[in-house]
Image (cartoon, helix red, strand yellow):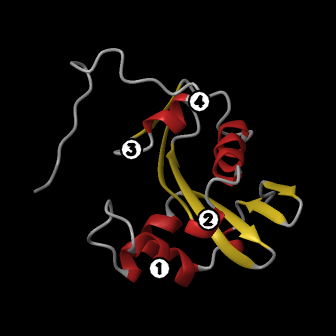
């Protein structure tokens, strides 16, 4: 299987599952506010069932993003994370651009995401607030 790989200086973005340092990703996501029920098993299941983008500096995992998709019409971008010491250096923008340009994703009709604090960042990639929020529905488990 051909995996997607992009390189810039000493940084690599890779979709090969063997690139993922699961322990590092677990530590990243355990720090976040959005995944409060994270366990090793739930992370492993999520990674297995997603198109995962690893951001590596040399051999060190410094970022991650997951895409859940049908590869035909829809994708959901989630769990985007860059280690704090590498933020504000353009790596997050590069990772999102690589995701949106991925050959299996770039022609999808809709890529969705939910963010509580990075709206301005994603607006720069042509994401928009829902044009018909009264059509958007979700079912939340309490």
Q: Residue at x 36, y 15 (%)?
A: 131
Residue 83 seen in the figure:
no
Q: Earlier in the sequence, mark 4 or mark 2?
A: 2
Position above or below: 22 against 9? below
Task: Calculate the distance from the C-alpha at mark 4 to the C-alpha at mark 1.
Answer: 28 Å
Which mark lies nearer to you, 4 or 2? 4
Identified at 66% across, 37% down, the residue is: 100
- Image coordinates for residue 90, horizontal then vertical, percent: 70, 49
Answer few, some or many: residues within 10 Å of disc 3's Cα (few below 14, many 20 plus, some between 14 and 19): few
N-term-proximal mark, 3 vs 2: 2
Q: Is residue 129 above or below residue 45?
A: above
Would you call the spot at circle 2 few (<14 residues within 10 Å), some (14-19), or many (20 or more)?
many
Q: Residues within 10 Å of mark 1 (few under 14, many from 20)?
A: few
Residue beneath the point at 47% across and 79% down:
27
User: 39 left or right of 68?
Assistant: left
Circles 3 and 4 in contact, beta carbons < 8 Å? no
Give the residue pinned by disc 1.
Answer: 27
The residue at which mark 4 appears reads as: 124
- Return the disc, 1 or 3, that comes first in the chain's sequence: 1
Badge 4 or badge 1: first in the primary sequence: 1
According to the picture, the residue beneath numbered tag 2 turns out to be: 63
For the residues labelled 3 and 4, the Cα–Cα distance comes to: 14 Å
> Extreme right residue here?
9
Q: Earlier in the sequence, mark 3 or mark 4?
A: 3
In-image side of 17 versus 74 (left or right): right
**Which residue in the protein does label 3 denote?**
115
């Amino acid at each position: 299987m051909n995996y997607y790989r992009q390189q810039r200086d000493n940084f690599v973005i890779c979709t090969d599952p063997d690139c993922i340092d699961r322990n590092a990703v677990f530590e990243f996501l355990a720090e976040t506010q959005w995944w409060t029920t994270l366990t090793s098993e739930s992370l492993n299941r999520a990674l297995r069932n997603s198109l995962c983008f690893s951001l590596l500096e040399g051999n060190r995992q410094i970022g991650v993003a997951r895409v859940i998709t049908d590869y035909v019409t829809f994708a959901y971008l989630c769990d985007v994370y860059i280690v704090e010491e590498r933020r504000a250096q353009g790596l997050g923008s590069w990772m999102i651009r690589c995701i949106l340009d991925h050959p299996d994703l770039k022609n999808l009709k809709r890529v969705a995401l939910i963010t509580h604090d990075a709206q301005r960042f994603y607006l720069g990639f042509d994401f928009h607030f829902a044009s018909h929020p009264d059509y958007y529905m979700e079912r939340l488990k309490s």
